[in-house]
Image (cartoon, coloured by chain):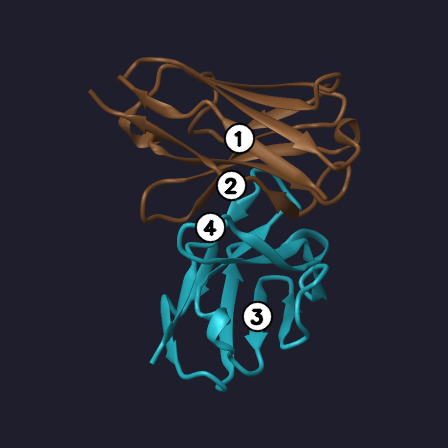
Chain colours: A brown, B cyan
Amino acid sequence: EVQLLESGGGLVQPGGSLRLSCAGSGFAFNIYTLSWVRQAPGKGLEWVSAITGNGGATNYADSVKGRFTISRDNSKDTLWLQLSSLRAEDTAVYYCTKTQGTSFGPFDYWGQGTLVTVSS
Amino acid sequence: EIVLTQSPGTLSLSPGERATLSCRASQSVTSSDLAWYQQKPGQAPRLLIYGASSRATGIPDRFSGSGSGTDFTLTISRLEPEDFAVYYCQQYGSSPRTFGQGTKVEIK
């Protein structure tokens, strides 16, 4: 059974940093592109960042470019998202997602999400 | 960036009725790389449809998708109580991957 388990969310002050983790299991972790998708309270879904299976390519939404960094360690079946220079508008539930295909594709599995709250 | 506009914002229907949800793209979606997701309160989204018309694993056949280019539709043939939720379309053919703003299907 495919599982994605996020952790690392919490309350952080504006300008602060946080690192989110996502542990994967039940699939060949090193093959699939993984993404982070966020959802602000009461709002819709926003794709944040993606990384290919071997970690060789990454991309970011314009809203987080230069502030967030996605990475992965395939030996540990773990995905990370480093959040820096946080703003109030980054407050959201952050979901880890697996792409159906090995590169582009829909998100066929989602974690349960971890809440990041940016507030003083 | 491809902007996806969903309509209506809210759909009020009764169990057993047919639901038709629309998703319009600001430019043509590559190779019908269009997906639909269902989200219930407090839960993560669930993939329903990909490639505009293919059902994901385990999705009942009352859910169907159609369309190409810039106009896509999700149809729920007969609403079951568990289908009342928010539905999002997403294009994944070009970067950035973008979502529509969602359509809420509520009980009338």
A13 lies above or below B41:
above
**What residue lies at 74% left-to-right and 34% top-to-bottom?**
A32
Real-space Cα distance between discs 4 and 2? Answer: 7 Å
Mark 2 crowd level (few <14, some 14–19, many ≥20, 10 Å Cα): some
Mark 2 near mark 3, Cβ–Cβ under 8 Å?
A: no
Find disc 3 in the rendering and name its residue: B74
Q: Give the amino acid at mark 2.
A: Gln
> Which dot marks residue B43?
4
Residue at mark 1: chain: A
SS type, badge 3? strand
**What residue lies at 27% left-to-right and 27% top-to-bottom?**
A88
**Same-chain status of marks 4 and 1:** no
Q: Give the amino acid at mark 1.
A: Glu
- As drawn, is B42 to the left or to the right of A24? left
**Same-chain status of marks 3 and 1:** no
Real-space Cα distance between discs 3 and 1? Answer: 30 Å
